[in-house]
């Protein structure tokens, strides 16, 4: 069965970076884009960007709001996608989700990132 | 960016009620619309894509309709597991954008 399993919770100081992983299984990893979505405490869903894990022509697409701060990469040998967010501030405290394809048919369980001094 | 506006923001209903949530896009998005249900502390679950197609395993009490700018999600008979927050999302253009959510509470 399709599964997206994310890395655990992180606590970071302002200005630091965080790298969250999303390991896929149960399907052909390179055939489906992975999107990243976050949710601040008590708030709605916000799209950060997506990656074509095959490393092919699809590349990456990032929300302009996060351009320059977010980097998405993939490792086909382990079927894992990574999302790195830099220059963290308190407003980046949120649960970060990975989701498959444009229709987000499968989701990871979420990774809580807390930014606090 | 395409703005997605849901209404209502919240509603109270009883088990067995029929509930309709609407989602309006700030510009035409054809049928590139998805609906999600999220329970507290959980990841969202995909219910509908392409505005009206049920995801595999989603019960037929859920239905979606619309095209262009106006969309609806209907739950024909609310069950206890349906008391949650619902989101629409457009995937017509980047950046993908979500509605602000509709919280369905028990009356």
Image (spheres, coloured by chain):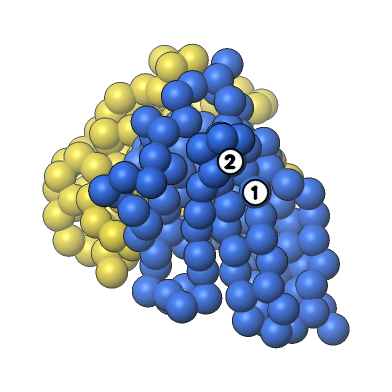
Chain A appears in which tint? blue
Label 1, label 2: how far apart the Cα atoms are = 7 Å
The residue pinned by badge 1 equals A21
Q: Which chain is yellow?
A: B
Which quarter of the figure has residue B20?
top left
Tell me whether the residue at label 1 lies in contact with that at label 2, contact meaning CB atoms closer than 8 angstroms: yes
Give the percent coordinates (x, y) of residue B78: 55, 26
User: Is tag 1's residue or tag 2's residue first in the polypeptide sequence?
Assistant: 1
* Left or right, A23 with reference to A32: right
Taking the spot 35% from the left edge, 41% from the top edge, the residue there is A102
Where disc 1 sits, the SS reads strand
Taking the spot 24% from the left edge, 56% from the top edge, the residue there is B93
* Left or right, B40 with reference to A117: left
Taking the spot 33% from the left edge, 33% from the top edge, the residue there is B49
The residue pinned by badge 2 equals A80
Q: Nearer the viewer, residue B39 or A15?
A: A15
Mark 1, other Cα within 10 Å: few <14 / some 14–19 / many ≥20: many
Chain at tag 2: A
Picture quarter with the C terminus of chain A: bottom right
Chain at tag 1: A
Picture quarter with the N terminus of chain A: top right
Give a yes or no on whether discs 1 and 2 share a subunit.
yes
Which quarter of the figure has residue B71?
top left
Q: Is residue A109 visible?
A: yes
Q: Nearer the viewer, residue A25 or B47?
A: A25
Give the percent coordinates (x, y) of residue A79: 56, 35
Q: Is residue B45 visible?
A: no
The image's mark for residue B48 is: none
Give the percent coordinates (x, y) of residue B97: 37, 58
């Amino acid at each position: 069965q399709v599964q997206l399993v994310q890395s655990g919770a992180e606590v970071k100081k302002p200005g630091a970076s965080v790298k969250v992983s999303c390991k896929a299984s149960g399907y052909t990893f390179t055939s489906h884009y992975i999107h990243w979505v976050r949710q601040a405490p008590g708030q709605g869903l916000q799209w950060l960007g997506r990656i074509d894990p095959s490393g092919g022509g699809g590349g990456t697409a990032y929300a302009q709001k996060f351009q320059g701060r977010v980097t998405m990469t993939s490792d086909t040998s382990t079927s894992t996608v990574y999302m790195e967010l830099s220059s963290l501030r308190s407003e980046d405290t949120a649960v970060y989700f990975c989701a498959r394809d444009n229709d987000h048919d499968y989701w990871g369980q979420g990774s809580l990132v807390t930014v606090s001094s | 960016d395409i703005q997605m506006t849901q209404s209502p923001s919240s509603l109270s209903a009883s088990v067995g009620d029929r509930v309709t949530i609407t989602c309006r896009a700030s510009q035409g998005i054809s049928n590139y619309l998805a609906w999600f249900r999220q329970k507290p502390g959980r990841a969202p679950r995909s219910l509908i894509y392409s505005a009206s197609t049920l995801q595999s395993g989603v019960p037929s009490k859920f239905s979606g309709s619309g095209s262009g700018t106006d969309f609806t999600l209907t739950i024909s008979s609310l069950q206890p597991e349906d008391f949650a927050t619902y989101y629409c999302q457009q995937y017509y253009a980047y950046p993908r954008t979500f509605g602000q959510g509709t919280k369905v509470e028990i009356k």
